[in-house]
Amino acid sequence: TENSIPSAEEYLAELEKVAERGYAVDNGEHEDFINCIAAPISGPRGVVAAASVSVPKVIAGLDELMSLLPDLLAAAEKASIECGAPAPGKER
């Protein structure tokens, strides 16, 4: 789409941003009419899955979708603990 990341260099830079902030945002990059946010679910040895919320733009714009980010991050954190990741601030 017009929003797709056009080069490998820019894609790698975006992956660094995702790692730093702890979640990913797809602003119509795969399908121009859908936005998505995603967060990792970790286990004792690292990331084991991801949780995401996708919505057609006609239902909710990116700003409205981003308002769900705190809930998504909380759900991913709870799932991570269930998968054996240490709770935030605690080490195994």
Image (cartoon, rainbow, N blue to C red):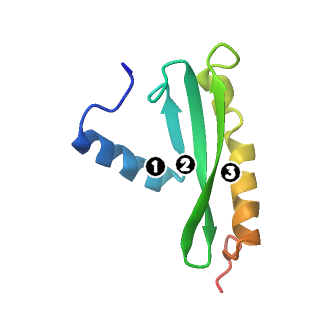
Q: Earlier in the sequence, mark 3 or mark 2?
A: 2
Residue 80, x across and y down, in percent: 69, 66
Residue 22, x across and y down, in percent: 54, 53
Mark 3–mark 2 CB contact (< 8 Å): yes
Q: Quadrant of the N terminus?
A: top left
Q: Secondary structure at mark 3?
A: helix
Amino acid found under the numbered disc labelled 3: Leu
> Farthest top residue?
58
16 left or right of 91 in image: left
The residues tagged by marks 3 and 2 sit, at their Cα atoms, a distance apart of 8 Å
- For label 3, the residue is 73
User: Toward which corner of the image does residue 77 lie, by quadrant?
Assistant: bottom right
Tally the numbered discs: 3
Residue at the spot 59% in from the left edge and 39% down from the top edge: 37
| On screen, residue 68 above or below 55 | below
- For label 2, the residue is 23
Q: Earlier in the sequence, mark 2 or mark 1?
A: 1
88 left or right of 47 in image: right
Amino acid found under the numbered disc labelled 1: Val
Q: Nearer the viewer, residue 15 or 88?
A: 15
Callout 2 crowding tier (Cα within 10 Å): few <14, some 14–19, many ≥20: some
The residues tagged by marks 2 and 1 sit, at their Cα atoms, a distance apart of 5 Å
The residues tagged by marks 3 and 1 sit, at their Cα atoms, a distance apart of 13 Å
Residue at the spot 70% in from the left edge and 77% down from the top edge: 84
> Farthest front residue?
31
Q: Secondary structure at mark 1?
A: helix
- For label 1, the residue is 18
